[in-house]
């Protein structure tokens, strides 16, 4: 759920090395078998997915239900996505009335963590499942706080105002796990400040309480649409963009708490890129909901040759307001102090849109994979990539992966068997604000919203409402 705020003028910054394309390192796979995880009437959009490291065939996928008052679709598979147990949660009861912005993370003990927003108060809730996603119980309700200023001194925990925080709400929470911790970050409104909270984890069903919200120092006093990652020593990284409205562009930052649950606190933000994608950037494929730069993180804790390497993906547009959007990747080997030059991952030769990147890292190998919505095949001239004769408004899911620490990637390959048209879903929500992916034990699982009905299982038919899809990509 993105909130429109007044535009903030940011200084233009030119980042060198922004025009590269990843070098191919191996032949790419064929289109994998697609699975309709929801097969449910109505729209399922804005998707989350996680795979169980203690049982890699156990997959859980979720979607916001944008056309109902409250509720969240949940699909659970114990056979790698071939069959699903389906239900709706969050229409009341202990989980509250779920609005949206759900995200998932599965820790090494088998705890499946979920964060989301509720309709009633805008707080950030955290729930956990210890039975493979078949049931969840609420374990924390994080109340966003006001802060006394836009920045806290380097290494200092923020001060908080005394008294009630009526009118303070959260946006786009994200959740991530480390070896023995779980962390949530989100944006607190109306101050537009990124905050984070973490908890220790010691086993299946065994964990401590979440820490008080810690405000992340932000440049220019604002940040949203972020993500969270935990490093091999328990350090925590968040990312965000400073422009939360408009189409004129944004700056993307990261900040790191070097000791996680320790006393150090988050350090000063590091500017990693200037994107020409703003907070509400309208494109033909997202004419109602729009897109943002949607930066996402992954951190290698595999113990392999690139252990400790952090990755970030985000969306660029060139030139501004051209709808020619690309997926960019950078990496850092020094806890986010410095970052590599941006590498363009999509290898098409069109001026069409690629957007909403999802990154996932296989902690058993250190391999990294990225998927995204891609309009490269919609030239408006008919064919399998064009449903309506209008260019750049139909999308497919494409992906790539690297087994070499992000230095080189396989050629892009198509994941979705069909072609998707969000305007045909007849929802203000389009595809939502983001999508996600999971990567465990050599199996990469993108999640996306799809109304192509390529599986023949969408009860709304072809090119109507969206179902939640996924596919298993085998990475050698």
Image (tube, helix red, strand yellow):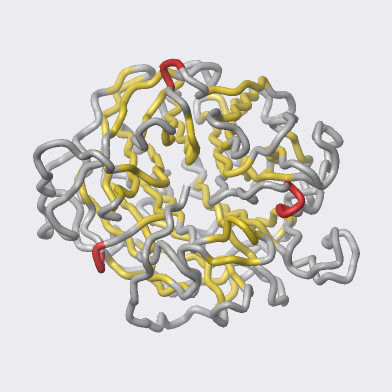
Observer able to see residue 407:
no
Among the 4 quarters of the image, the one containing residue 76: top right
Q: How far across and how far down the image is residue 191, in percent?
A: 25, 54
Q: Residue 205: give x, y in percent of width and height.
A: 36, 17
State left or right for residue 331 relative to residue 133: left
- The answer to whether residue 401 shows anywhere in this view is yes
User: Does residue 349 lie above or below 100 as drawn?
Assistant: below
Q: Where is 16 relative to 155, above or below?
A: below
| Residue in the picture at 46% in, 26% down | 97
Q: Residue at x 73, y 45 (%)?
A: 450
Residue placed most toward the observer, 99 or 452: 99
Q: Residue at x 51, y 44 (%)?
A: 362
Q: In the figure, residue 169 lies in which quadrant? A: top left
- Front residue of 255 and 46: 46
Indicate left or right for 386 with 61 as reference. Answer: right
Above or below, 69 against 452 in this view is above
Relative to 345, 186 lies left or right: left
Number of disc labels: 0
- Residue 442, position as x, y percentages in the image: 60, 41
Which residue occupies 62% across, 37% down?
A: 67
Residue 396 in percent (x, y) is at: 73, 55
């Amino acid at each position: 759920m993105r909130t429109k705020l007044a535009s903030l003028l940011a200084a233009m910054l030119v980042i060198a090395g922004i025009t590269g394309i990843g070098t191919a390192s191996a032949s790419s796979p064929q289109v994998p078998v697609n699975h309709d995880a929801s097969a449910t009437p109505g729209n399922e959009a804005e998707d989350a997915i996680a795979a169980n490291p203690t049982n890699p065939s156990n997959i859980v996928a979720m979607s916001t239900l944008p056309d109902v008052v409250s509720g969240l679709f949940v699909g659970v598979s114990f056979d790698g996505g071939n069959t699903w147990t389906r239900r709706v949660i969050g229409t009341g009861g202990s989980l509250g009335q779920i609005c949206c912005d759900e995200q998932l993370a599965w820790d090494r003990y088998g705890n499946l963590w979920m964060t989301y927003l509720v309709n009633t108060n805008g707080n950030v809730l955290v729930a956990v499942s210890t039975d493979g996603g078949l049931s969840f119980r609420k374990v924390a309700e994080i109340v966003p706080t006001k802060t006394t200023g836009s920045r806290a001194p380097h290494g200092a925990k923020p001060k908080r105002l005394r008294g009630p925080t009526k009118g303070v709400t959260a946006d786009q929470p994200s959740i991530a796990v480390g070896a023995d911790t779980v962390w949530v970050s989100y944006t607190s409104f109306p101050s537009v400040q990124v905050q984070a909270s973490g908890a220790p984890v010691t086993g299946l069903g065994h964990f401590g309480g979440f820490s008080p919200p810690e405000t992340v120092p932000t440049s220019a006093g604002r940040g949203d649409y972020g993500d969270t990652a935990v490093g091999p020593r328990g350090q925590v990284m968040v990312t965000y963009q400073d422009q939360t409205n408009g189409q004129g562009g944004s700056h993307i930052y990261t900040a790191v708490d070097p000791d996680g649950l320790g006393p150090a606190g988050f350090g000063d933000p590091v500017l990693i890129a200037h994107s020409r994608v703003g907070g509400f950037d309208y494109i033909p494929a997202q004419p109602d909901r729009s897109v943002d730069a949607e930066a996402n993180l992954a951190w290698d804790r595999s113990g392999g040759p690139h252990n400790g390497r952090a990755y970030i993906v985000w969306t660029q547009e060139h030139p501004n307001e051209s709808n020619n959007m690309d997926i960019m990747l950078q990496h850092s080997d020094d806890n986010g102090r410095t970052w590599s030059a941006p590498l363009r991952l999509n290898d098409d030769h069109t001026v069409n849109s690629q957007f909403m990147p999802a990154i996932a890292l296989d902690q058993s190998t250190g391999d990294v994979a990225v998927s995204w919505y891609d309009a490269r095949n919609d030239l408006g001239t008919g064919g399998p990539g064009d449903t309506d004769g209008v260019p750049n408004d139909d999308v497919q899911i494409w992906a790539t992966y690297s087994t070499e620490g992000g230095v080189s990637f396989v050629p892009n390959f198509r994941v979705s068997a069909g072609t998707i048209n969000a305007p045909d879903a007849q929802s203000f929500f389009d595809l939502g604000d983001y999508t996600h992916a999971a990567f465990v034990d050599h199996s990469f699982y993108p999640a996306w919203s799809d109304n192509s009905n390529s599986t023949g299982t969408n009860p709304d038919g072809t090119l109507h409402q969206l179902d939640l899809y996924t596919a298993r990509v085998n990475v050698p």
